[in-house]
Image (tube, helix red, strand yellow):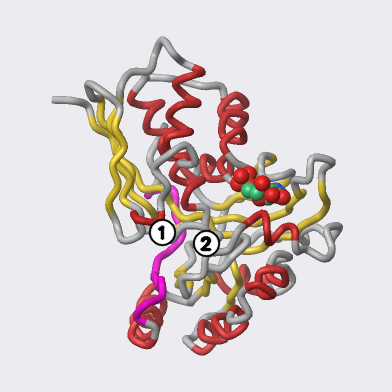
Amino acid sequence: MHVSLSATAYAKLNLALHVTGQRADGYHLLDSLVVFTRYGDALSVTAAAEDSFTLSGIYANQVPVTGDNLVLKARDVLRAHYPDLSSAVAIHLEKNLPVASGIGGGSSDAATVLVLLMRLWKISAESADLNRLCLALGADVPMCMHGQIYSGGVIAKGIGEDLQHVQNLPELPLVLINDMTALSTPQIFKNLHKRDNPPLPKLPGLTTISDLCDYLTSTRNDLYAPAASLAPQLPRILNILDDSGAKFTQMSGSGATCLGIYDTIAQAQHAAAQLRHNYPHWFIQATSTVTASALPQL
Ligand code: C5P
């Protein structure tokens, strides 16, 4: 029997995303409050005689299977760093999250494959090395790694590599919605009008969903305006979430997936069922944020 390990690659949600500057190399400086959802892609790694990569899931046909694939890049980067510990592996990805949709699917897949392969190959990396390795795969990969390792949310600064753990966030009942618009992240950043915006207001000690929603009303997603200029249906989608009973709505990342926060899981599930009925071809998913008990250990 070959050893097999599996885990969920959580979706990444930017509850707030402030663009505060730009580096000389073009990358943007961010100040973002990020959480992770129980709903995500499913990954498994199995020791094998030779490498393979297989796909299933509703969005499998949107995933590139060549050099651009972050799962394969993550495998190859880890193997290059630890050639003596690595061996052949069969990787399977069940793609449940739409690609290029602002919820970090590819980045989370990369972080999750790293976690699984480190367990399979018995690699223990220093956290600074792991952060560097993740950053080399993409600006969102370090925060997705954080989501795999720790509970709760994270404030991401720098271009996404400077991470501060946020404790005591309440578990959030959520609906994710995307009308199947794919947006290009570089294009959205390029279309920004203003790059030196104020940072996040200081996060108070939050305990309830209402507290968090109150706080979020004083925050922004600075990528919303450039995203809405390419996807003019976005204000309507936020209105649809508002009308379904969401306490707070926002676009995640560079879009076009939007999120609604509800008072209870039952309300989120009810809203998602209604919305799916009205918009059967959209990605619509009720879920909740990851808490300590749902997290795998490294
Ligand atoms: O790092 P990643 O490949 O995920 O980023 C995709 C693109 O998004 C980058 O090439 C860059 O154009 C833009 N980006 C940015 N600032 C960030 C993150 C991403 O300008 N902090």
Query: Does the magenta run of residues contain 285?
Result: yes
* Relative horizontal placement of residue 34, taking residue 109 as reference (left or right): right
Quadrant (top left/top right/bottom left/bottom right) for the C terminus? top left
Report the residue that reaches farthest toward the left. Answer: 1
Q: Which residues are magenta?
A: 280-294
Q: Label 1 is placed on what type of residue?
A: Leu
Q: Report the residue at 23% width, 24% height from top.
A: 48
Q: Label 2 is placed on what type of residue?
A: Ser
Q: Is residue 251 above or below residue 246?
A: above
Q: Is residue 277 above or below residue 225?
A: below
Q: Residues within 10 Å of mark 1 (few under 14, many from 20)?
A: many
The percent position of residue 183, horizontal first and vertical second, equals 58, 63
Does dot 1 land on a helix, a strand or a loop? loop
The percent position of residue 187, horizontal first and vertical second, equals 68, 59
Q: Report the residue at 41% width, 26% height from top.
A: 118
Give the residue at mark 2. 101
Give the residue at mark 1. 97
Can residue 156 be seen from the camera position used here?
no
Quadrant (top left/top right/bottom left/bottom right) for the N terminus? top left
Camera-nearest residue between 174 and 257:
257
Labels 2 & 1 near each other (Cβ < 8 A): yes
